[in-house]
Amino acid sequence: MANSTTALLDRFFRNSPLRHAQFRLYYGGSIAVALGYTIQATIAAWLMATLTPSALMVALVQTASTLPTLLFGLVAGALADIVDRRRIMLVTQFLLIAVTLLIGVAELLGLLGPVALLAGTFLIGAGFTFYLPAQQANVNDLVGRADLTRALALGSVAFNLARALGPAIAGAIAAWLGSGSAFLASAAFFTVMIYAVYGWKPRERAIPGVPDTLLSGMESGLRFARHSPPMRALISRTLAFSLCASALWALLPVIARDQLGLDAGGFGMLSASFGIGAMCWVLVLQRHLPPMSLNMMVTAGSFLWMAAVVLVAFSGNLALAAAGCFSAGAAWVAVLPGISAGIQSTAPAWVRARAVAMNLVAMQASLALGSILWGWVASLSGLSVALASSSAAMLVLLVISYRLKVRMGDEADVTPGTQLPDLAIAVEPLPDDGPVLIQVQYQIDPLNRDAFLRAIHANEPARRRNGASDWRVFRDLGEDGRYVERFILVSWAEYVRLRSRMTVADQQAQDHVEALLQPGTAIVVTRLISTQSGGD
């Protein structure tokens, strides 16, 4: 019977990443975790609105939820690239269960106050911060390259399914059994992912050689982002959008309570409208739109968000506010999941979780800081002014950054290149020996000088992304046509990693340089290591 069911599911999902049994189980766990987290977040925001009349305190719930990503996001990304992601996911799920249960019991006993609620929300946000990079980066290990985009789109559907159902579930439980029981229910959802990944085998490292330490892993992740123009563009758009979009998230409980006079159920309906809009965009609306580039989709989504927020800002009844939230949900998944897909399509396997984490840090930092900003504006000038101002700010940032284009990465950008031959070294240095100086000598026909310089300088970003801390090209004054590429790495381990991190795109750029060599000559590589570190 089990085999028949599996075969039926495989046929049903023939053209979907869900045809992979392990991914189906993992996807179910992802939906459950998203539901648990959304239920908890919805109840925490509403509960704070009942505990205090301060709009700023309500907005601080969003800050407490997102601040951990700002503090620990880079650590979480490096950890997910270095150690077993299964272990990270199990530990974080147990943490989420424990803290959510504690908050629920405290509320049921009448012991929960605003400060305790903020502290618990912060701990849950910390657990989710360490969970997300591992969860998102694992998708690439469960499906093939051809299924990656659809698998990431399904991930967006999962989270927005939770946005649609979670608030409704939270509002129903809170209205029926109380807020404390809703927290207990959210804890139950976190157990599903434990079941999904418990039996996994440890994964192999993305690249061979000396593994990163936590500190060097964080440094290499930041270095990759700094020297990757596509990554910089994607993260910049995340920052700009999230800073302005935080106003609606932070102030929605106050809008429901003060502007519309709703209870917990009505607030749940507004949040559910957002999630339904997100699902409709992914499952229905996006399919009927003409094909568009990632940049066009992100820009269109930003304009849709601005219009939706203005509608919510000046609506006086539930129907108009729900329509605005529906449109905002569609805009949200047009922008942020699209950027996330761009991030994962641009980052090679060795740095993928760190790239995901950096984008999450950018998003959550903007949400946290924006929540404080728009909460303060609302306290001074009112809800409508705060929401309209956030929409105007998004328009200004969009105009300023109109030349900053975002795009999906090419397969060559993430596919590992051909394994380089082993180094012929009599006594290999220790991993921490260094710095290491690499000199690459080229003999070029003087007629090809300009083409060579363009090609060799196009190599600089790849060298720096993969580990070089300094890079320059020198011309030999005594021999026309002789050039030396020189770059420095902080340690021998970093040089070993650089050789393993080359992608097909990096090799294509290097092949372009080698094609300009003078006939009959070859590249000469010299490797030097500092004697002060004890290296040979």
Image (spheres, rainbow, N blue to C red):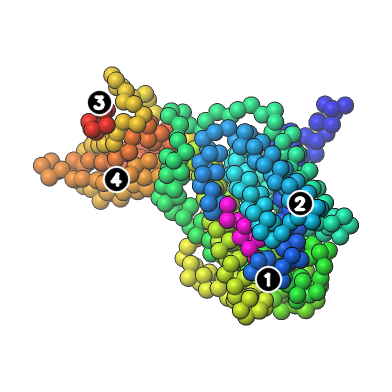
User: What residue would you read off at disc 1?
Assistant: 54
Q: How much space separates mark 3 and mark 2, taking CA atoms?
A: 62 Å
Residue 64 forms part of the magenta stretch = yes
Q: Is residue 69 visible?
A: yes
Q: How much space separates mark 1 and mark 2, taking CA atoms?
A: 22 Å
User: What residue would you read off at disc 3?
Assistant: 536
Of pointers 3 and 2, the one earlier in the residue sequence: 2
Residue 228 forms part of the magenta stretch = no
Name the chief secondary structure element in magenta: helix
Q: How much space separates mark 4 and mark 2, taking CA atoms?
A: 57 Å
* Image coordinates for residue 322, horizontal then vertical, percent: 78, 69
Of pointers 4 and 2, the one earlier in the residue sequence: 2
> What residue range appears in magenta?
59-68
- Residue 67, numbered circle: none
Amino acid type for the residue under numbered disc 4: Trp
Q: Nearer the viewer, mark 4 or mark 2?
A: 2
Amino acid type for the residue under numbered disc 2: Ala
Of pointers 1 and 2, the one earlier in the residue sequence: 1
Q: How much space separates mark 4 and mark 3, taking CA atoms?
A: 22 Å
Q: Is residue 36 visible?
A: no
Q: Nearer the viewer, mark 4 or mark 1?
A: 1
Which residue occupies 23% across, 33% down? Answer: 532
Count how many numbered circles sit on residues in the image.
Answer: 4
Q: Quadrant of the N terminus?
A: top right
Amino acid type for the residue under numbered disc 1: Ser
Q: How much space separates mark 3 and mark 1, taking CA atoms?
A: 65 Å
Of pointers 4 and 1, the one earlier in the residue sequence: 1
* Image coordinates for residue 242, horizontal then vertical, percent: 58, 62
